[in-house]
Amino acid sequence: MLDREGPVPLYVQVAEVIEEQIISGRLAAGEAVLSEAAMEAEYGIARTTARRVVRELRDRQLVHTVQGEGTFVGRPGVPRMRETTALYMVIATDVIARIRRGELRPNRAIPSEETLMRRHGVAKVTARKAVAHLREQGWVITVPYRGTYVSAPEDWPSE
């Protein structure tokens, strides 16, 4: 639990939590640490604080960052573990499952980008990519300046 009123800055407290996960083996060498957006959601911190967490972990030589890919446990050169499924696909799969279960009905709005970002702890670009994928597959339609809605069942892709 973070002490939001104590003398230790939040970024140091979160860095210590993640350092403990690394030392204990819950986060293995090459494994990705939480994205900044996921840290925001997980710890209830601001994006700038999440950036300071990553910088602190790099300063402690516990992680390294690869531009456009993320931050990984270990020093540069440590083989990275890759996500088996892209995050946008995880989001799209979740939305499709909700459509199939009837939680999201035809001609009704799907969750907003902001909601998808919070629910899945991802950046806006990832949420947008998920919605674009759903649109390409025929699960949703986007009406400019209105939103994105579940398509009619006859427009859904066949399995």
Image (spheres, grey):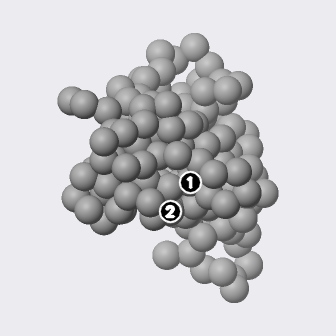
Find numbered disc 1 in the image and state the secondary structure of the residue it sits on: strand
Examine the rendered structure and indicate whether residue 26 appears above or below residue 102. above
- What is the distance, in whole Å, between disc 2 and disc 1 at their CAs? 6 Å
Residue at 61 percent of width and 27 percent of height: 69
Find residue 65 and name its label. none
Which residue appears at 50% of the width and 38% of the height?
135
Q: Tell me: 99 left or right of 113.
A: left
**Neighbour tally class for label 2: few under 14, some 14-19, many 20 plus, Cα within 10 Å:** some
Is disc 2 placed on a helix, strand or loop? Answer: loop
Q: In which quarter of the image is residue 157?
A: top left
Residue 12 locus on image (x, y percent):
67, 61
Residues at marks 2 and 1 touching, judged by CB atoms closer than 8 Å: yes
Circle 1 packing at 10 Å, graded few (<14), some (14-19), many (20+), is many
Q: Estimate the x, y position of residue 46 in percent, counting from the top left.
A: 72, 65
Q: Can the viewer see residue 11? A: no
User: 115 or 20: which is nearer to us?
Assistant: 115
Asked if residue 128 can be seen in this view, the reply is yes
The residue furthest bottom is 5
Q: Quadrant of residue 38?
A: bottom right
Residue beneath disc 1: 148
Query: Residue 111 in the image: x percent, y percent?
Result: 50, 62
Residue with the mark numbered 2: 109
Amino acid tagged 1: Thr
Q: Position of residue 52 (x, y in %)?
A: 75, 52
